[in-house]
Image (tube, coloured by chain):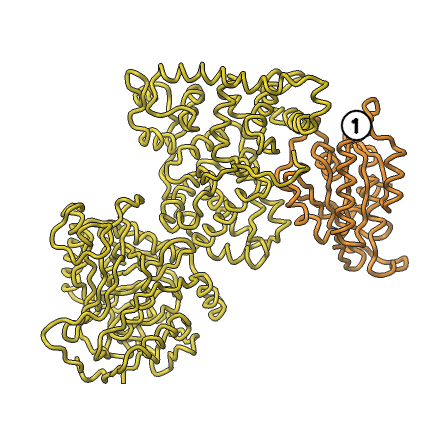
């Protein structure tokens, strides 16, 4: 008797719930013995057992290029097939399956359409439940290839899995609670074997002896409750003790996502090659199995002794795995014809990121800069420019020109003449603003406490801002006076926000680069458009960034995240200084300016600074966790990293992390989080505290 | 909270006060013996530790140095929660900083640990010619509020170690002092040096 419930996903309460629901909804549910192949004889026609609309793929980062379609499970005879057909129009939710297209190119359509893949060809399904955004599934074939993530805009992930489970053998991976292994073995031994080895290719015969359903699966189009992936992970981790959620596995899936965008051509080639190799005969038994005793640690799921695996059972290893490194009991490798790559455990992850981020390039110099400008001074291809700066930064002598674009003070498509005109207008504007406080007489100031206090704050801070830099050192340095004037003018320009400690740190490098008072002011204004919320009285700008940071660490290094959680460090206040002033205090002046211009490109993300945080934390994860740092020690440690962070390595690591995190990473960051431009509200900086100046 | 093991006491200490009063300078003078004329502002908070020998015991101070601006006030409870001691710092050349220091005292009296040892430090005592807050005024306020008071100068190091030493002396002991003959655990000569500087 082949009884899937023996290997139930009973640790998944959602699953159990949906199962119950379905059992109630379905009048009858007849199961057949595994011996009776195709006991439920359908007529010739196919039966649709599951259908879900608005299942969408995101081929690129751009929302406009998303492709929605209809996902179906179709039972044909004893075989179950999965199809996903894009709609004719990607925004048309009600369209039927496609045969022609209006908007999508034929090539795209062919590329992404999933035409009747036998479910037996699916190796595993990974469920993702981002905190923000839609649940999605990544379906990995036994060839090692994966389809693009399928986003369930209308919910239905649970129903999909539940339906699948009624037709094929589906078991939750012992290594990862969000991974479901799909296979269809008659032989329970083979089945239990395959359940041990998640991402590996197991030869899957086309035999089909699934319990079948007389009626079609319930169509539950109610929007699905978004279940909390993280809690199921922690629940799981608690049960399995040492088997903590593995970041490298997350990564492996994300890499699969990246590579799932291979062209259909590549996909077909791979499949073809795979077939050829498999036809060459089975490779030798994998001795690895011997070192993998059946982990019978999940009693509830009923893995019992009867299923202990004899070594003789022949399993064809994935032929593309031969160059991959293996870790005991862990398979973090994925291979495609596009490239064989290794996914290693978190200890080795640091090395991986080091080779992964692109090498840094030399800084952009004036000659090359000129090539980005047309005859009238317009920047023709701002994206290329930003990319170039992202990977190399700027030579110092062109910073004063290029920073104005990066900061948004100048438009990329403005001409020399327009910029010159703008500068003169803005200079006059600045003088007007400045005269507002300059015209306050001592008698007026005596009656203007807020002004006096604000001026006092600024004067206290400018005299201790970067005074060791030659530009600001010495007594009566005129540049210190400029800092004061600009900050005081800004506190009138943005009176609601006022002056806050940290602003002088943000202004100092800008004045150093621009030299000019008015231009420094306007560049600072542009920067504060994005970073102003860092200084909000209610700290919400900082809170949203530190929250996003915690979600990113959870995504990219869940053991570290768990460590922080266990040690009450989840508020990430130890990163407060990093985020508030964009690492200003963590690097020497030149390196800090390099980092800033890289961040300001917003090339990979507007929130690249958060990935920089993750990169630095990951670099020191072994020390942090090894020395069992508590919050105090951690804060001390982080503060003392200042001056000891390798910028180039950090940038490469951060780039790799950002690329790997992809949309999952972006989904960790709530809209409006600095350094995104704030979502407009009537009062940009609501006043809360009358005592505050 | 002060915790005690044998004769070794760990004590969390927080520095509060207006921006520019000299909180970081006091800590750096105490912990590292350094003084910078233009000590940069503290962003968020900084953490230091330093051990003092007092009589036959040692006190390890875990010191939280906080950002002074009112804007960051909302973060302060995170730092003074559970503190065994606090130094409220003002600048003797600034009446505003004295006013603000008094507000901190009020807040700690309301929110803080009732057994907290509170020190009131009038810093920048070397700037006598610019003095705005008289010693008497501050002393009176301190006495009325059960604080102990010192005027300090991080620049000249005047009274800096003394104020920490006095706090260490006043920290409540969980148990009576052991009689003579108690051997201090793993505290060789370097610790007695720090005791010497505070005598």
Residue drawn 60% across and 45% down?
A: A637
Q: How many marks?
A: 1
**Which chain corresponds to the colour orange?**
B
Question: Which quarter shows the C terminus of chain B?
Answer: top right
The reply to whether residue A530 is in sight is: yes
- The residue to which callout 1 is attached is B93
* Left or right for A605, reference A263: right
Is A377 located above or below residue B173 in the figure? above
Task: Place residue A180 in its image quadrant.
Answer: bottom left
**Which chain corresponds to the colour yellow?**
A
The subunit letter for the residue under badge 1 reads B
* Left or right for A372, reference A490: left
Task: Place residue A536 in its image quadrant.
Answer: top right
Residue drawn 38% across and 58% down?
A: A249
* Left or right for A73, reference B195: left
Name the one closer to the observer, A601 or B192: A601
Element assignment for label 1: loop
Is A270 located above or below residue A189 in the figure? above
* Left or right for A307, reference A314: right
Residue B77, percent from left and from top: 68, 49
Residue A1, percent from left and from top: 27, 85
Residue A310, percent from left and from top: 31, 78
Residue B95, percent from left and from top: 79, 30
Name the one closer to the observer, B31 or A594: A594
């Amino acid at each position: 008797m082949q009884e899937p419930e023996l290997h139930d996903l009973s640790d998944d309460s959602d699953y159990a719930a949906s199962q119950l629901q379905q059992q109630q909804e379905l009048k009858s549910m007849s199961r057949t013995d595994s011996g009776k192949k195709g006991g439920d004889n359908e007529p010739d026609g196919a039966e649709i057992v599951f259908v879900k609309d608005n299942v969408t793929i995101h081929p690129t980062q751009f929302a406009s290029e998303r492709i929605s379609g209809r996902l179906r499970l179709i039972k044909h005879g004893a075989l179950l097939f999965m199809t996903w057909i894009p709609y004719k129009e990607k925004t048309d939710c009600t369209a039927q399956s496609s045969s022609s297209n209006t908007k999508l190119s034929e090539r795209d359509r062919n590329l992404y359409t999933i035409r009747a893949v036998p479910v037996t060809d699916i190796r595993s399904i990974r469920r993702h439940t981002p905190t923000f955004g839609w649940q999605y599934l990544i379906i990995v074939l036994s060839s090692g290839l994966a389809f693009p993530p399928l986003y369930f805009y209308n919910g239905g992930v649970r129903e999909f899995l539940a339906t699948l489970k009624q037709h094929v053998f589906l078991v939750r991976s012992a290594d990862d609670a969000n991974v479901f292994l799909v296979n269809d073995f008659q032989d329970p031994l083979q089945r239990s074997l395959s359940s041990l080895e998640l991402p590996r290719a197991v030869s899957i015969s086309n035999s089909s002896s699934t319990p079948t359903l007389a009626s079609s699966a319930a169509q539950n189009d109610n929007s699905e409750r978004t279940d909390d992936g993280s809690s199921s992970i922690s629940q799981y981790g608690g049960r399995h003790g040492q088997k903590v959620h593995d970041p490298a596995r997350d990564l492996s899936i994300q890499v699969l996502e990246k590579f799932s965008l291979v062209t259909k051509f590549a996909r077909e080639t791979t499949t073809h090659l795979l077939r050829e190799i498999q036809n060459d005969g089975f490779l030798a038994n994998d001795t690895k199995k011997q070192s993998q005793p059946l982990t019978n640690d999940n009693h509830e799921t009923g893995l019992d002794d009867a299923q202990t695996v004899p070594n003789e059972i022949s399993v064809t290893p994935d032929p593309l795995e031969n160059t991959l490194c293996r870790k005991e009991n862990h398979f973090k490798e994925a291979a495609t014809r596009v490239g064989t790559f290794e996914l290693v455990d978190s200890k080795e992850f640091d090395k991986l990121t080091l080779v992964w981020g692109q090498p840094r390039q030399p800084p952009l110099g004036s000659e090359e800069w000129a090539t980005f400008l047309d005859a009238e001074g317009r920047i023709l291809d701002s994206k290329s420019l930003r990319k170039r700066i992202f990977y190399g930064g700027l030579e110092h002598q062109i910073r004063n020109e290029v920073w104005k674009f990066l900061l948004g003070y100048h438009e990329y498509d403005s001409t020399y003449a327009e910029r010159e005109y703008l500068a003169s207008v803005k200079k006059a504007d600045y003088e007007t603003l400045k005269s507002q406080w300059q015209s306050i007489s001592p008698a007026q100031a005596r009656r203007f406490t807020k002004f006096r206090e604000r001026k006092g704050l600024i004067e206290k801070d400018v005299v201790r801002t970067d005074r060791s830099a030659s530009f600001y050192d010495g007594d009566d340095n005129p540049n210190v006076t400029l800092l004061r004037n600009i900050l005081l003018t800004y506190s009138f320009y943005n009176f609601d926000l006022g002056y806050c400690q940290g602003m002088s740190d943000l202004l100092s490098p800008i004045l150093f680069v621009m030299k000019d008072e008015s231009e420094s002011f306007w560049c600072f204004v542009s920067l504060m458009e994005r970073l102003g919320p860092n200084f909000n009285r209610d700290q919400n700008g900082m809170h949203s960034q530190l929250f996003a940071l915690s979600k990113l660490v959870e995504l990219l290094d869940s053991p570290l995240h768990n460590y922080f959680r266990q040690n009450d460090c989840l508020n990430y206040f130890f990163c407060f200084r990093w985020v508030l002033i964009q690492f200003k205090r963590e690097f020497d002046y030149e390196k800090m300016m390099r980092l800033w211009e890289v961040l300001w490109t917003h090339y990979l993300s507007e929130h690249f600074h958060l990935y920089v945080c993750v990169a630095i934390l990951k670099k020191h994860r072994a020390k942090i966790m090894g020395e069992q740092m508590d919050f105090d020690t951690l804060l001390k440690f982080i503060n003392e990293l200042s001056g000891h962070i390798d910028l180039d390595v950090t940038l490469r690591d951060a780039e790799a992390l950002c690329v790997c995190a992809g949309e999952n990473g972006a989904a960790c960051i709530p809209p409006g989080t600095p350094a995104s431009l704030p979502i407009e509200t009537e009062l940009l900086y609501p006043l809360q505290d009358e005592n505050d100046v | 909270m002060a915790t005690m093991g044998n004769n070794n006491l760990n004590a969390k200490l927080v520095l509060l006060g207006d921006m520019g009063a000299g909180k970081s300078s006091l800590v750096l003078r105490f912990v590292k013996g350094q003084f910078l004329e233009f000590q940069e502002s503290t962003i968020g908070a900084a953490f230091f530790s330093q051990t003092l020998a007092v009589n036959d015991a040692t006190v390890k101070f875990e010191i939280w140095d906080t950002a002074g601006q009112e804007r960051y006030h909302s973060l302060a409870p995170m730092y003074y929660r559970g503190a065994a001691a606090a130094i409220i710092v003002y600048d003797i050349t600034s009446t505003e900083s004295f006013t603000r220091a008094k507000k901190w005292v009020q807040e700690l009296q309301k929110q803080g640990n009732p057994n907290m040892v509170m020190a009131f430090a009038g810093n920048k005592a070397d700037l006598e010619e610019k003095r705005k807050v008289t010693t008497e005024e501050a002393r009176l306020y301190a006495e009325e509020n059960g604080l102990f008071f010192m005027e300090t100068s991080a620049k000249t190091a005047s009274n800096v170690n003394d104020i920490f030493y006095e706090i260490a002396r006043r920290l409540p002991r969980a148990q009576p002092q052991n009689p003579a003959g108690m051997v201090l655990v793993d505290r060789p000569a370097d610790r007695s040096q720090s005791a010497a500087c505070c005598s």
